Amino acid sequence: MTIDRRQFLKLSALGGGAVLASSLPGCAGLSASEPDFYFVQLSDSHWGFQGPKVNPDARGTLPKAVAAVNALAEPPDFVIFTGDLTHTTDDGAERRKRLAEFKQVASGLKCPVVRFMPGEHDASLDRGVAWKEFFGETHYTFDHKGVHFIAIDNVSDPAARIGEEQLSWLKADLERQPKDARIVVFTHRPLFDLAPQWDWATRDGAQAIALLEPYRNATVFYGHIHQEHHHVTGQLAHHSAKSLIFALPAPGSQPKREPIAWDAAQPHKGLGFREVENEARSAKFAITEYPVDKA
């Protein structure tokens, strides 16, 4: 079966989103030498999670996501997983086993470029040691068709900090970019204080936001909170991705952060897709969400 982007966004049993790069602030009005492109963001697959009350298809969702991406009529330029690839475990051997299994499933993606970032479930208990064995550095940059991408690690430190060394690295990288550069930042946790009592924050995230604030065409995509959420700090927009495993309640809406129970009548409630499209010749963008039960 071959599917187009819009059909992909409506597939069931998947989370994450497809993002058109031209939709990002500052990406409008691209010249012929800087063509539009799109990438796929997937997040929070939690490979190794077991909990039939919140997802009886825990080992099936990720392979379905891989199959869906491979079925796109026009493949994305790249795919990125924004953290919590695996579910946490105190057993180092089991952690490596889950990372290896996840990598094997993800290797089925036919996209020429697949990038990975850790979540706290992957990296906080050993400060990313096992993660680096499988995926390399936990923070990095790359450039693609006129857009500068920055992956920030705010999970390897168990205290939920980016850390002075990485902040210095970020500062130096940004200083090499013009103020009107098109910049996309990937993190796992939100950089701002969304719900600190639920670990939905980065303790020194305000410092990263201050470094990014002068760049008027910067956008942040993150995971961690297992739901769609949009927030603006100054002129910096932050957009969270839905999860591949289970939904979580709205920030601070109840005393405890507990997964939303699986509803057999609405089996994929809380999992869905996002399409972000640029309005022609403007810096505005429109986001359309598709519930996964409308295949």
Image (tube, rainbow, N blue to C red):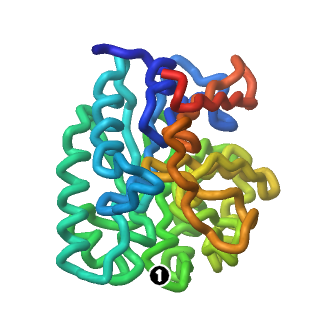
Tell me residue 184's x, y (percent).
56, 48
Which residue is denoted by mark 1 in the rendering? Answer: 157
- Compared with 195, 116 (above or below) is above
Q: Nearer the viewer, residue 294 or 162?
A: 294
Tell me residue 255's x, y (percent).
71, 73
Question: From where the camera sits, is residue 207 visible?
Answer: no
Tell me residue 113's x, y (percent).
30, 40
Question: From where the camera sits, is residue 133 visible?
Answer: yes
- Compared with 106, 36 (above or below) is above
Q: Amino acid at mark 1?
A: Asp
| Position of residue 177 in the picture relative to residue 84 (left or right) | right
Quadrant position of residue 20:
top right
| Position of residue 59 in the picture relative to residue 279 (left or right) | left
Mark 1: give few (<14), some (14-19) or many (20+) Cα within 10 Å: some
Q: Residue at x 52, y 55 (%)?
A: 186
State the quadrant of the N terminus.
top left
Quadrant position of residue 203:
bottom right
Q: Residue at x 45, y 31 (%)?
A: 12
